[in-house]
Image (cartoon, grey):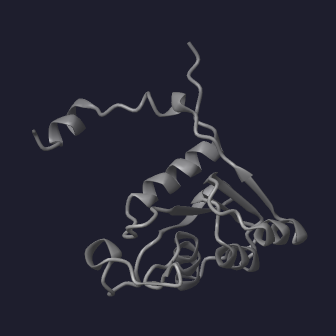
Amino acid sequence: MTMQRIPWDQYFMAQSVLLSLRSTCARLEVGATIVRDKRIIAGGYNGSVSGDVHCIDDGCYVVDGHCLRTIHAEMNALLQCAKLGIATDQAEVYVTHFPCLACTKALLQAGIKKIHYLNDYRNDPYAIELINQVGASAHQVHLENKYFTKLQLGEDAAAALPKG
C-alpha cells in the first residue's frame, strides 16, 4: 500500500488552522502562515497588541462594527517578518479566512504573490480586483478529511494527557 503525502496547500493551511487556535479574538479565530520556497517564514493569529488586554478576557473594543483592539492574523505575520528582517517578496500566504481589504493591500504591498484561503469571509470585490490588477492570485483551499483522520497520538503522547 502506497501512503499518500498531504499536498503542500493542505499542509500549510493546516498550519494556519493550528495558529488560529491561539487567537484571542472572541468574534472570529483566524490564522495566517507566510511561506516562501515551500518553507514557513512566519505565522500569525488575530489578537491584541503584546502587553494589551485580550478580547477573550475583557471583551471586544468595537467601534463602527470593528474591534479596534485586534490586529489581524495576516498583519501579525507580516509584522513578525518586519520585526525579524525576513523578506516577503514573492512569498505566499495561507489564511483561514479571505483577507479584509486592508490586509489584502498590506499583503500585496509586501510582495505576496499568492493568497490561499480556506473560508470565504466578506470577500471584498475591490480586494479581488487589486489582487488581479497587480498580477497576484487568490485561491480557495479545501482540506480533505483523509489527510487528517489518520492523525493519532502515540502511546507516550496519549499517556501524557490529563485524565478525565
Q: Nearer the viewer, residue 153 or 54?
A: 54
User: Residue, x 64% and y 55% (percent of image)?
Assistant: 120
Which quadrant is home to the N terminus?
top right
x%, y% of residue 37? 69, 58
Compared across the picture, whether 2 is left or right of 133 comes to left
Q: Image quarter for residue 90?
A: bottom right
Compared across the picture, whether 102 is left or right of 81 comes to right
x%, y% of residue 33? 56, 61
Q: Nearer the viewer, residue 96 or 159?
A: 96
User: Residue, x 44% and y 53% (percent of image)?
Assistant: 18
Q: Residue furthest left?
A: 164
Compared across the picture, whether 61 is left or right of 141 comes to left
User: Residue, x 45% and y 59% (percent of image)?
Assistant: 20
x%, y% of residue 54? 32, 78
x%, y% of residue 147? 52, 32
Q: Is residue 107 above or below residue 150?
A: below
User: Residue, x 80% and y 72% (percent of image)?
Assistant: 126
Q: Residue furthest front?
A: 64
Which quadrant is home to the C terminus?
top left
Label count reads 0
